Image (cartoon, rainbow, N blue to C red):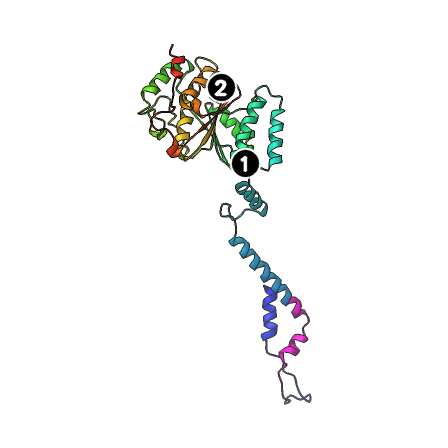
Amino acid sequence: MKGISSAKLIVLQPSKQVGGGGGSGGGSKSTPISTLLGSHPCFWLIAFASFFTFASYLAFLITTATWDPGLPSSATQSDRASSSFRYNHRLPDPVFESLVNYAAASNSNSKMGDTDLRTIAAVLHRRAPCNFLVFGLGHETPLWRALNHGGRTVFLDENEYHIAHLEGRLPGLEAYDVAYTTKVQEMPDLLATARRGRRGDCRPVQNLLFSDCRLALNDLPNALYDVPWDVILVDGPRGYAPTAPGRMSAIFTAAVMARSAGPGPTDVLVHDYEREVERVCSEEFLCKENLVANTGQLAHFLIPGGDVARRDDFCTNRTAIAEVAH
């Protein structure tokens, strides 16, 4: 800006007095501007630099005006490019497939079976980016987040220390701890109570936040009850022992959320479906009529929502309770 000021001074400054005939009494005349400019060749360099500076500043203003409002004003250009990709594009198919193949080839003993993993991945490939709710943290947690790139993936787990550990390894992980009050050995009584209350506290369409049903999870963060979940995966809590919490509450809550929060439909997947709790509770609340696929260990249900959802009962033909009456 100093160069611009100097240029203005050169142009506007009165010309020097030029003496005539060498005497003090000689007359004076003004030098024309064109002559003055021609006598200062550096002026054009200064003018060009000033114009370039002004153009650059104007471009900056235009860029700022179109800045992504979701980013802080101090974000870099690479941050903007990353944000645009993150919020406006799904994961490219080659990247998606590579992640699935890598996870399937993992040698971890705690990982999910290849067929089940690929079944869930296929659902995410169809729905992502989406709202994805996962009951349980495990070996596949980073994979589920990655496959739902651009969407929202939320995890619910019974172990707050496990959550804290993974939050340190996976920045940005959205996970909440859940206090389950049920036990696997209580399943027959819990199902019987739920059936008696299917027109009341245990009805299929309701606001779980205010539910007194014994199977309802009503202590989650309030905002989660209003999310229209596209995909729900039940892969927790523990259910391998009589005193373990079991997945009765997770399956019931998933069934109600799928019918209540949005227009649907919602893909609900239940892992370890070969176990009694998972199979019986799924048939009771997710219903055989909504079963899309069954790999043996993983069941895939498609639950209608909105006006299509049944509001008086979960299923049209319920026979699951008879199997566990005693």
- Under tag 2, what secondary structure? loop
Please give the name of the residue rendered at 58% of the width and 63% of the height, measured from the top-left corner.
1
Please give the name of the residue rendered at 61% of the width and 65% of the height, measured from the top-left corner.
3
Furthest residue in direction top, as rendered: 326
Which quadrant of the structure image shows residue 100?
Answer: top right
Q: Position of residue 67 (x, y in %)?
A: 52, 50
6 vs 210: above or below: below
In the picture of the structure, the residue carrying the numbered disc 2 is 273
Tag in front: 1 or 2: 2
User: Given the image, on which type of amino acid does mark 2 rest?
Assistant: Tyr
Marks 2 and 1: in contact by CB < 8 Å? no
Which quadrant of the structure image shows residue 97?
Answer: top right
What's drawn in magenta, residue-wise? 25-46
Crowding around mark 2 (Cα neighbors within 10 Å: few <14, some 14 to 19, many 20+) is many
Q: Position of residue 73 (x, y in %)?
A: 51, 49
Cα separation, mark 1 vs mark 2, equals 27 Å
Label of residue 149 in the image: 1
Q: Is residue 179 visible?
A: no
Q: Quadrant of the C terminus?
A: top left
Task: Indicate yes or no whether the magenta region holds residue 243.
Answer: no
77 vs 316: above or below: below
Q: Is residue 284 visible?
A: yes
Crowding around mark 1 (Cα neighbors within 10 Å: few <14, some 14 to 19, many 20+) is many
